[in-house]
Image (cartoon, grey):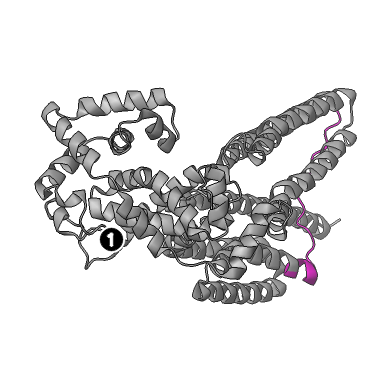
Amino acid sequence: MQKMTNESELLEASVAGNTEAFGSIVERYQSLICGITYSATGNLSKSEELAQETFIRAWKGLSGLKELGKFRGWLCTIARNAVKTSIRQRMRDATVASVPIEDAGQIESVEPGPVERVISKEQQAIVWGALQRIPEKYREPIVLFYRQKQSVNQAAGGLGLSEDVVRQRLSRGRKLLKAEIATVVEEVLGRTGPSKVFTVAVVAALPALTAQTATAAVAGAAVKGAPAVKAVFLSGLSGAVLGPLLGLLGGIFGTWMSIKNTQSARERRFMVIMGIACWIALILFIAVPLVLSLTGVIPKLAYWPSFGLFFVLLAPSIVWSNARQRRIQKEEGTYVEVEFRPAKLTKSNIYGAFGGSIFGSVCWIFVLAFLTKDWLIALSVLIFSVILFFISTKKCLGETSKFFGILLIDMAAIALITFVIVNLRWERWMEFYRDSYSGSFDMPLWGMNLILLAVFSVLLGLFVLVIRKERQYREIKSEGNEKRQKKTARPV
């Protein structure tokens, strides 16, 4: 068989189950991946162990990589996630202490007898002690530079940075190293890179693909319209395109109704201007970033900050717009005071309101727990939702005037259970996600807590405002009834 050198061919052959082709991939990227893992751990043996784990994970998940051209970045993400998982496991396991630097040489290497045996544990301690004091943004380029035969181009490619940026970081990193230590660092890093033995060890450890998996992988790589690819495309289309399209139709209807309900030419002009401004913002902040992310021009994660910014700006814009519209109506003499009147609640209204709010609020937790096979949490969420639904509806049917108060208590209970579950299980769910290799997104626990805090704060705040409005309405109505009763009781 003719030897393949093109990376795309090697990856396609690897997807089909060709271990020899994947061995060539390992040989190309082993210095990069070992450099990344060493830069994070400072332990030669552990870094190669994590690098080997990275390649095995990549082998298992390669068929799920939709764009083979992004293999290098995807592989680096797996390596960094493997490091994070390893560090978290060490921290959680109280019985297993972190390996001291001075004991680094006592750990068994994945390679039985290569250069690492020549490097003394004192040298390893000196090197890592010097590197550890350097910020990671400078440490990683230094490690990759010396591990990859002092090639700025390869180091830049591995980090996904320009060569100029890598040169600047190398220069800064060298300055942070003491002159007498810099030579030792260069020597040790240059001599401890993975060799051919590492490649052989990885290939030998690769689990075999079943015939069915290999056939499906070949079909997926050869035919762009294969069922698996169509399924991925359709799921992405439904989430990323269908949702915005439905929102677009709703937005068009809402804009048309806002303009239609105006009472004067001046108010109509204002609403037309606001409608145009809103659509321009929608295009700039949501439509354009969405198209760019779906076509791969910008990273997919870059879409979400723009999406969030749109809604951050939307709230104050709506408040200002409503205030301005009321002012115009008052100046034009068309303003009518809107009286708050609580809606009349029927049995079906109550069931629908509580069912939608309770089950809708926790369904994402149930789905995540189900997908990660966290059956205990999935069952607990389901039981909690059913019990809360029956208690709330029974209480509200007995006293409909307390509808919003009960709903507020429900939201507080849902917020509490959500925070508890997320803080207990989020790391496990993210580990399951990392093992799926479907992307590079990694939401930290603090970030998730921040999002939940913002969402529930807004919801609870809205319920409090509605309850206050309802109480004011009832007080005004009660005062009116008392005045009418006094007038009726007054003797003629």
Q: Which residues are magenta?
A: 333-351
Is residue 349 located in the magenta-colored stretch of the structure?
A: yes
- Which of the pair 324/271 is nearer the observer? 271
Q: Residue at x 30, y 63 (%)?
A: 92
- Which of the pair 87/147 is nearer the observer? 147
The image quadrant that residue 229 belongs to is bottom right
The image quadrant that residue 331 belongs to is top right
Q: Is residue 405 visible?
A: no
Magenta residues, dominant SS class? loop
Q: Quadrant of the C terminus?
A: bottom right
Q: Is residue 120 visible?
A: yes
Q: Residue at x 40, y 29 (%)?
A: 153
Q: Is residue 360 left or right of residue 26?
A: right
Q: Residue at x 60, y 52 (%)?
A: 459
Q: Which kind of residue does numbered mark 1 sit on?
A: Arg
Is residue 297 located in the magenta-colored stretch of the structure?
A: no
Identify whether 165 is placed above or below 373: above
**Label 1, on which residue?**
90
The image quadrant that residue 82 belongs to is bottom left
- Which of the pair 354/480 is nearer the observer? 354
For mark 1, give the secondary structure: helix
Q: Residue at x 53, y 65 (%)?
A: 413
Identify whether 64 is placed above or below 279: below
Residue 294, position as x, y percentages in the image: 66, 41
Residue 282, position as x, y percentages in the image: 71, 34
Residue 184, position as x, y percentages in the image: 15, 35
